[in-house]
Structures are given as structure tokens and as C-alpha cells.
């Protein structure tokens, strides 16, 4: 439910997504999803145009390209009691990845989870051996790691099956990170979002899967158990009227989807007006709104019970919960609203939006703002101009490339009571150009350095392209017995 922004040359794709109710961020300032980069070439048409494409695919190829010896580090920041609640912390240090979950490993009562009496702010460092992290998405009490080879690894609360590991029930504390199960494992995952108790995923074929709580039909489908599903299921393409979904976001109990032609669909609860009045069906509903008639949406971001929309024009619109002034309306009002309104007026050149639980942030090429101001409780405040990455969750988190207490680059700050509090700890970056990403559960912030460079991947894919095409044409048996994958599309 939160969002992440990384400052990087202010290069932004035409369509991007932001996760929801407690995660997210972006680096300086143009982090883009794989879904977004692939969709930019489709142009700004409201209707899909048919085009032929040839996609060669192979999971094993990505492992060969990026190397199987690369490790990833993920830092979890929060109060000690929170970090050890309901399996949120999958284990300090080198983290094991669980392939099969036994019934004995599932706890039906949260009371059995390990909790600490120490309420001091602390950090947990996770190390994923031989795993390259592409993106981390987080909901209220759960997180998913999307790896460079398109797989899903998950940890945290599973009381609604939101981890997608095939069972419903909290996992034992410090149990480890679990893999997704079911049909979704046959697809290459490129993006996703996590909400209160549910999660959404987009594949390289622009298929959409959902898992977890479904009491408000936030999964966009009818499930056998009306309240939850523990294995991700596909939302039929016809639910989006044949349009290609390129981005998604998730709130506490609602979901939002963006298509390559700029259409927006909602599913789930319209609590506080989060879905602009669109709710109550058993499939995603197309948003039809006069205010957006002459706009082209390029980003979406859901908060707890609200939704933000960034358009190509640079205008931002919002709808839903505004109880703390998080939607930054002109009048500084704290009233919830179910009609789509223009927000963050006066901020120019916006390239990224992020909505958290009861706060939000936007970034232009050289500066970022957040709402509500923690000093005036209504107006906007500027984020530290030295910030190289910004995230939104329970509050605002940002990173700078200052020298930290360890004598290395990189400091992390959380906005608290109008002040920036240093929470860096052992976190550091290798160089001032490192790309820092954020995600966040409720009361927990997740920070990591992205080692996934799309340009690196593309260049190495081209090195393999000739061999792949030879295999497809029957001139080679190098990839015999395996499914061939490449991110390259030939149109």
C-alpha cells in the first residue's frame, strides 16, 4: 500500500504502478516497472490496437545472465515488538527459502507468535543467497519479493492466505521465506502490489493474478471461499474488456488497475469513496469520469482507503479517505470525498506519486513534497532536498548519500513529529549512484539496494538472442528440454 521513488535522471516511463497501503518508494527520480517500460511503446490510445509480437522465453536464461552467485540484502526497520509479530520477520541473517510447508508449520492463533516486550526501534537484516531482488511490495503485515527471474518469495502474516503459499494461517516466527504455489509459478512476474490482506501480480504476458482476502471482492474474481484464497488465481482478461493491464495498486480492501490505453479499473470496497463509487460487482469495474475525459493516466497509487492518479499532463487527482489531509486538497480540508478531485495543485513537473496509510508524497525532477505537513497538519511540506530516494508507508521515509556512522555512503530517515529521525543502523550503499528502493508494512519500513539494471539485462539478452533464435528455428538443441525466456519482444 505504499510507494517508493528513486531519483535517477528523472527518466520516467509512460505508465507505472505503485503498491499501496503501506509500501513504496522511488529513487532519484524515475523508478519504473517492467510492465510500464513494455507498455510505453503502445502509445496513448484508449483502445488496444492489435499488433503481432514474438516472445521467446526461458526462466533459466535469466539465471545464466544475472549469475547465480549474487546475494541480496534487505533491511527491515521497526519497533522490536512489531518486527517479531505474526511472522513479519522471517529470520535474521542468512534467510532460508522454504519449498514445502507442512501443516505443523502453520499457526492458527496469532497469540502463539513470538513477541518482544522491548518497544525500542530496531532493524533486522535479511540476506538472500543466490537471489537477485527486482522489487519488494508490501501490504499491512506481509511482503513479497519479486526476483530477477520472475518468481515470488514471501514473508509476513498469512492469516488470509495472502502469501500465496497454498495454506491459510500464520507461519511460525522466524520460519523463513516461502515460495508461491499454483498456476502463477508458470508465469514470469514483472510487477505487483500488496494491500491490507491481499496481493496482486502482473506477468510478462500482462496477465493479472490475485490472492488473499476477498471479503469485499478486492481480488476482482469470485472465489470458492468468499473470504480468502491461499493460491493466486488469474483475473480473466475479459474482466478488463480485453485491454492490457500494465500496472496495479492495492489499498486496505480495494484494488486499482491501469491499462496501456490509460483506462482505470476498480475492484473491492468503496469505503470512504476509495473507488470513486465503483464497487459491488464480482469483477473490476471501468472508471468513467468526466474530469479524466481529457487526461491520460500514467500512474496509480492506493492508500488505506484512497486512490491517487497521475496523468501525462502532470495533473494529480485523488479520491477517498482524506481524514488527515493526506490528499492535499486546495482548501486543506480533512473531509473524505467520493468524487475525483484535482490535488497537489501548484506542484509542477511531477514524475511520481505515492500514497501510504494516512500520508502521501509526490516527486518532481528536483524536489519532493508530502502531505499532510506534520507541523500544520494540512498543508504541504518539502522533503529534504538531498533525498535520493523516497518511500511512503505509515509515514515518509527517505535516503540520502551522506556519509553514515559506519563511514560508508547512505543514510535513512523517517519523518516523525515534523522532524527527520536517522534510522540508518547498518544500512549502507556501495556508491553515491546506488539505487535505493523502499517498501513498507504497517509500522515496518523495508529498504534495499536494487542491483537489477534493465540495461544490463537487455544487453546480455542480445548476446543470447542469436542462440535462442537458432533453437526456435530448429538449428540448435542448446535449450532443449526447457522453456526459453527473453524480455525482448520483436514486433
Image (cartoon, rainbow, N blue to C red):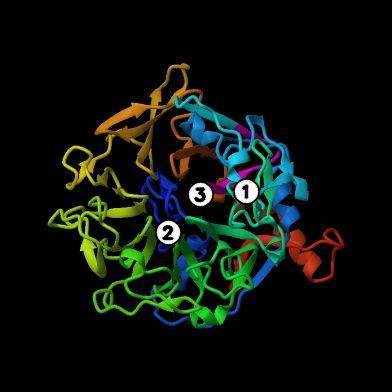
**x and y percentages locating residue 209 in the rendered image:** 59, 66
**x and y percentages locating residue 165 in the rendered image:** 68, 55
Q: Residue at x 65, y 35 (%)?
A: 174
Query: Which quadrant of the view contains residue 374?
Result: top left
Write down the region rendered in magenta: 126-143
Q: How far apart, in angstroms, are the residues tagged by discs 1 and 2?
A: 18 Å
Residue at mark 2: 251
Q: Secondary structure at mark 3?
A: strand
Of residue 362 and residue 488, the one placed in the foreground of this image is: 362
Q: Residue at x 51, y 74 (%)?
A: 244
**x and y percentages locating residue 330 in the rendered image:** 14, 57
Q: Residue at x 54, y 82 (%)?
A: 238
Q: How far apart, in angstroms, are the residues tagged by discs 1 and 3?
A: 10 Å
Of residue 15 and residue 331, the one placed in the foreground of this image is: 331
Residue at mark 1: 154
State if disc 3 and disc 1 touch (CB < 8 Å): no
Residue at mark 3: 138
* Residue 142 falls within the magenta-colored stretch: yes
Q: Is residue 222 left or right of residue 290?
A: right
Q: Along the polypeptide, which appears first: circle 1 or circle 2? A: 1
Q: How far apart, in angstroms, are the residues tagged by discs 3 and 2?
A: 11 Å
Q: Along the polypeptide, which appears first: circle 1 or circle 3? A: 3
**Dot 1 alpha-carbon crowd within 10 angstroms: few under 14, some 14 to 19, many 20 or more:** many
Amino acid at each position: 500500500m505504499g510507494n517508493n521513488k528513486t531519483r535517477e535522471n528523472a527518466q520516467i516511463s509512460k505508465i507505472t504502478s505503485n503498491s499501496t497501503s503501506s509500501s513504496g518508494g522511488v529513487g532519484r527520480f524515475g523508478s519504473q516497472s517492467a510492465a510500464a517500460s513494455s507498455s510505453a511503446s503502445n502509445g496513448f490510445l484508449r483502445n488496444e490496437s492489435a499488433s503481432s509480437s514474438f516472445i521467446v522465453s526461458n526462466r533459466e536464461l535469466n539465471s545464466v545472465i544475472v549469475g547465480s552467485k549474487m546475494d541480496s540484502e534487505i533491511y527491515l526497520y521497526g519497533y522490536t515488538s512489531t518486527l517479531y509479530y505474526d511472522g513479519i520477520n522471517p529470520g535474521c541473517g542468512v534467510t532460508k527459502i522454504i519449498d514445502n510447508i507442512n501443516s505443523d508449520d502453520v499457526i492458527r492463533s496469532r497469540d502463539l507468535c513470538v513477541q518482544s516486550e522491548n518497544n525500542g526501534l530496531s532493524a533486522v537484516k535479511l540476506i538472500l543467497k543466490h537471489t537477485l531482488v527486482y522489487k519488494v511490495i508490501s501490504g499491512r503485515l506481509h511482503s513479497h519479493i519479486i526476483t530477477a527471474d520472475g518468481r515470488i518469495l514471501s514473508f509476513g502474516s498469512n492469516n488470509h492466505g495472502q502469501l500465496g503459499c497454498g495454506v491459510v494461517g500464520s507461519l511460525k516466527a522466524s520460519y523463513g521465506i516461502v515460495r508461491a504455489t499454483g498456476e502463477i509459478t508458470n508465469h514470469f512476474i514483472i510487477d505487483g502490489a500488496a494491500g491490507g490482506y491481499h496481493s496482486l501480480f502482473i506477468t510478462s504476458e500482462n496477465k493479472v493474478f490475485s490472492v488473499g482476502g476477498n471479503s469485499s471482492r478486492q481480488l476482482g474474481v469470485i472465489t470458492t471461499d468468499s473470504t480468502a484464497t491461499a493460491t493466486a488465481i488469474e483475473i480473466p482478461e475479459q474482466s478488463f474488456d480485453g485491454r492490457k493491464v500494465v500496472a496495479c495498486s492495492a489499498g486496505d480492501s480495494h484494488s486499482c488497475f491501469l491499462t496501456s490505453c490509460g483506462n482505470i479499473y476498480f475492484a473491492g470496497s468503496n469505503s470512504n469513496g476509495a473507488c470513486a463509487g465503483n464497487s459491488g460487482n464480482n469483477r473490476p469495474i471501468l472508471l468513467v469520469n468526466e474530469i479524466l475525459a481529457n487526461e491520460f493516466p500514467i500512474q496509480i497509487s492506493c492508500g488505506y482507503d484512497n486512490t491517487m492518479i497521475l496523468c501525462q499532463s502532470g495533473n494529480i487527482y485523488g479520491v477517498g479517505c482524506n481524514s488527515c489531509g493526506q490528499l492535499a486538497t486546495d482548501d486543506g480540508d480533512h473531509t473524505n470525498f467520493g468524487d475525483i478531485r484535482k490535488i497537489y495543485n501548484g506542484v509542477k513537473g511531477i514524475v511520481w506519486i505515492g500514497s501510504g496509510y494516512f500520508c502521501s508524497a509526490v516527486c518532481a525532477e528536483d524536489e519532493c513534497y508530502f502531505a499532510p505537513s506534520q507541523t500544520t497538519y494540512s498543508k504541504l511540506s518539502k522533503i529534504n532536498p538531498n533525498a535520493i530516494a523516497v518511500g511512503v508507508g505509515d509515514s515518509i521515509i527517505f535516503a540520502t548519500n551522506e556519509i553514515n556512522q559506519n563511514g560508508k555512503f547512505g543514510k535513512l530517515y523517517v519523518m516523525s513529529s515534523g522532524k527527520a529521525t536517522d534510522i540508518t543502523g547498518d544500512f549502507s550503499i556501495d556508491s553515491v549512484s546506488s539505487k535505493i528502493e523502499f517498501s513498507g508494512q504497517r509500522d515496518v519500513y523495508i529498504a534495499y539496494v536494487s542491483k537489477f539494471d534493465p540495461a544490463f539485462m537487455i544487453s546480455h539478452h542480445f548476446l543470447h538472442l542469436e542462440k535462442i533464435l537458432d533453437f526456435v528455428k530448429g538449428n540448435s538443441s542448446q535449450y532443449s528440454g526447457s522453456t526459453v525466456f527473453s524480455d525482448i519482444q520483436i514486433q
